[in-house]
Amino acid sequence: MMIDAIIVGAGPAGMMAAIYLKRANKDIVILDKNSPGGRLKSTYQVDNYLGFGRVSADELVQKMVNHLKDLEIEETDGFVKKITRTPKGFTVQTELETYETKAVILATGTAPKHLGVKNEKALLARGVSYCAVCDGIFFENRDVVVIGGGDSALEESLYLAEIASSVVIIHDLPELTASQGIIKKVKQHPKIQIRLNTKVLEFIGSTELEAVKLQNKSTYLLEVFPTSGAFIYVGNQADTSFLTDSMNFDQSGYIEVNQEMSTNIPGIFACGDVTKKDYRFIVTAISDGAIAALSAVKYIDSL
Ligand SMILES: Cc1cc2nc3c(=O)[nH]c(=O)nc-3n(C[C@H](O)[C@H](O)[C@H](O)COP(=O)(O)OP(=O)(O)OC[C@H]3O[C@@H](n4cnc5c(N)ncnc54)[C@H](O)[C@@H]3O)c2cc1C
């Protein structure tokens, strides 16, 4: 069966695209390798979202999912592995299914960047984590570190400080890079300490994390710093490796799109954090999602 459009990714961008396509009477499938919500599921609180001010991320995701349900849009489980051009459109392959579609909307977002140090992989889920909301609860009344100095690192430090007995922020630059408001909150928090100009060289532990090996970037002094948990927030990256080489990406692997959210391949649109852009927020993702959907409607109708 030929579907009008397949949306890959059910984060804010993909969900918004699904709503606009459905309202234009297109038949769609929205695929995600996880449950809907995207990166919003890895935070606890959302700020600056119009109409909400401050809202729990769980509540916002639930409202988005309900919005889809009201329009009878069901997200389908599916880890997309390959997209191929055919004479009639595209095939989208997941681990279990192959779909035929006229148009594709890529809304695959980003994943957390890894530090790339010794034992990071081996101790993942054994003390090393990229998601405070998912794993923070395991560190009740224990000491944790947060690695990174941007908004996400500091926001999640505040969240962890409600659970853990202490939080030490480790950042490899001389200054934190987060916005001033959140820096002020973190500095005033009695349970949070900040170590600047300090690099993490290694995670130490046999079956569980026991310590992090640190190096001061000015003095080069090494230190083994005991901790039960390490939460890594050193940026994000797009995983576009499953896409065709003929698609235009920037040097970091983000998809290049024009104002209509069209990629260089006619019939494939992209939206949200996976695209090349300066600002990655919910509001920019959903705006892209709406534009990508309307452009896809125009494309499908022109066929
Ligand atoms: C810790 C943290 C805190 C944040 N706080 C805020 C905030 O307070 N306010 C704000 O506006 N923004 C915040 N953001 C940013 C916001 O979450 C993102 O900008 C937004 O989620 C981007 O939406 P998206 O749909 O483009 O991508 P994502 O949310 O990343 O969703 C992409 C989806 O695609 C799926 N996917 C990926 N590859 C495949 C594949 N091959 N097959 C199938 N599915 C796939 C993923 O599973 C995911 O569900 C925060 C982000 C983080 C990490």
Image (tube, rainbow, N blue to C red):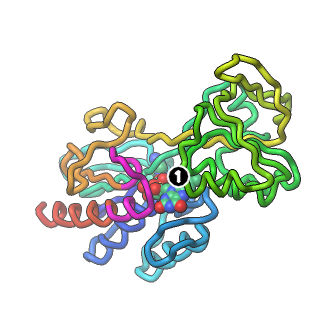
Residue at the spot 38% in from the left edge and 36% down from the top edge: 253
Disc count in the image?
1
110 shown above or below 48: above
Residue at the spot 76% in from the left edge and 49% down from the top edge: 192
Q: Is residue 303 magenta?
A: no
Distance from mark 1 CB to nearest ligand 1 atom below 8 Å:
no
Say which quarter of the image contains residue 122: top right
**Foreground pick, 68 / 205:** 205
Horizontal and vertical percent position of residue 212: 77, 30
Name which residue type carries label 1.
Ser
Left or right: 296 with respect to 105? left
Left or right: 261 with respect to 271? left
Horizontal and vertical percent position of residue 229: 78, 42
Magenta stretch? 272-287
Horizontal and vertical percent position of residue 39: 53, 55
Q: Residue furthest top?
A: 220
Residue at the spot 66% in from the left edge and 39% down from the top edge: 147
Q: Secondary structure at mark 1?
A: loop
Q: Residue furthest bottom?
A: 70
